Image: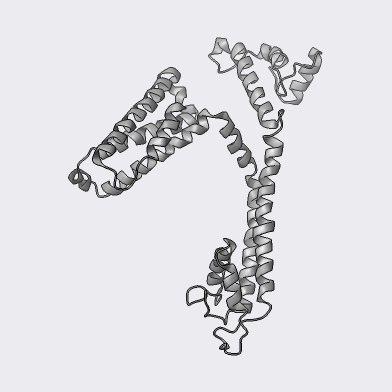
């Protein structure tokens, strides 16, 4: 983990106009970290053998190390050599950007970050539903803006590009205004009712503030808070409690692996004897096992109901 953190600092140390000596030092530091990650990767590969690629994180580590080596090779190739490859210069830039992927190795090392990512992942279905509702809000207000303000094309913040003359430009304006960028000034353009205004050009309506205030209230205060509420609810369910679902599941999986290893030692971990199923389920702790059931026949009946038979 220390290598990953220090590597982050070295990647952030580059700046425009740095000297050649400074760049050379950073390159040597990059070689060191690449070597450290490569030693870790190949050590795991030797230890696990073919099972190394069964883990998604191991596949990612192998990809990071391979991209790092390719980056070093292309960085040491001459400009003429890169021109032989038609996409050589672009590929070299991509490989350099791929160094940033090393940061994601922190997720594998730091279990707290993994729990946060898992919690956010569990909230995705609800977030997608909220996003669909937000899209509907944008659609409704974009259509209404075209209906009410399509004839107003000039103002302090309105021009030939930023206006409400059709749905596509109206949607772009709604997305822009939802960021909070000059929405009061756009509202002032649309509420222009001065005597010298030109109808069909810059004459607005007095009730334009009602439209914009409703949009800002719904989008910035209700919808954004809804997204925050969904994520906080998932954190309260899966992350904050001491005895949360994620921790219980991890403990159950760990217990299953330990018990399975004990009963499948004679078959290299691939299977267990049919006669040992009852003993296996009795010894397995947690919600996955039946250690709390004392009666042997009850265990057998439960296994039959689960369609697990010797």
Asked if 267 appears above or below 83 in the picture, the reply is above
In the displayed structure, 95 sits above or below 221; it is above
Q: Total number of numbered labels?
A: 0
Question: Which of the 4 image quadrants contains residue 278?
Answer: top right
Depth order, front residue of 190/44: 190
Q: Which residue is at 30% across, 49% downward?
A: 90
Q: Is residue 192 left or right of residue 63?
A: right
Residue at 61% over, 11% down: 262
Q: Residue furthest left?
A: 80
- Residue occupying image coordinates x 49% and y 77%: 159
Residue 147, above or below 69:
below
Colouring chosen for the image of the structure: one colour
Image coordinates of residue 264 in percent, x first then y, are 59, 13
- Left or right side of 10 for 142: right
User: Quarter of the image holding residue 207?
Assistant: bottom right
Q: Residue 36, position in %: x, y?
A: 37, 25
Residue 23 % position (x, y): 28, 39
Between 255 and 131, the one nearer to me in the picture: 131
Q: Is residue 34 left or right of residue 304?
A: left
In this picture, residue 103 sits left or right of residue 174 = left
Instruction: Tell which residue pokes out farthest to the top in this image.
Output: 266
Q: Position of residue 63 (x, y in %)?
A: 40, 34
Q: Quadrant of the C terminus?
A: top right
């Amino acid at each position: 983990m220390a290598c990953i953190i220090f590597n982050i600092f070295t990647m952030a140390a580059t700046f425009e106009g740095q000297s050649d000596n400074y760049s050379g030092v950073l390159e040597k530091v990059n070689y060191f970290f690449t070597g450290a990650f490569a030693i870790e990767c190949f050590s795991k590969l030797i230890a696990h053998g073919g099972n190394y690629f069964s883990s998604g994180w191991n596949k990612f580590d192998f990809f990071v190390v391979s991209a790092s080596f390719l980056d070093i090779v292309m960085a040491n190739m001459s400009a003429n050599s890169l021109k032989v490859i038609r996409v050589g210069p672009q590929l070299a830039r991509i490989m350099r950007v791929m160094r940033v992927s090393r940061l994601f190795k922190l997720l594998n090392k730091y279990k707290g970050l993994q729990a946060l990512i898992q919690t956010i992942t569990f909230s995705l279905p609800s977030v997608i539903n909220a996003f669909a509702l937000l899209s509907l809000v944008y659609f409704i207000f974009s259509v209404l803006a075209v209906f009410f303000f399509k004839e107003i094309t000039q103002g302090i913040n309105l021009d030939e590009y930023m206006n409400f003359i059709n749905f596509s430009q109206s949607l772009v304006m709604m997305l822009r205004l939802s960021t909070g960028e000059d929405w009061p000034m756009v509202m002032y353009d649309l509420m222009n009712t001065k005597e010298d205004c030109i109808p069909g050009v810059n004459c607005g309506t007095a009730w334009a503030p009602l439209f914009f205030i409703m949009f800002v209230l719904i989008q910035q205060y209700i919808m954004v808070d809804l997204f925050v509420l969904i994520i906080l609810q998932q954190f309260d369910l899966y992350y904050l409690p001491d005895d949360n679902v994620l921790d219980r599941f991890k403990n159950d999986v760990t217990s299953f692996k330990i018990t399975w290893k004990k009963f499948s030692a004679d078959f290299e971990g691939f299977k267990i004897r049919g006669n040992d199923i009852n003993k296996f389920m009795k010894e397995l702790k947690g919600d996955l096992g039946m250690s709390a059931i004392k009666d042997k026949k009850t265990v057998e009946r439960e296994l039959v109901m689960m369609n697990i038979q010797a």
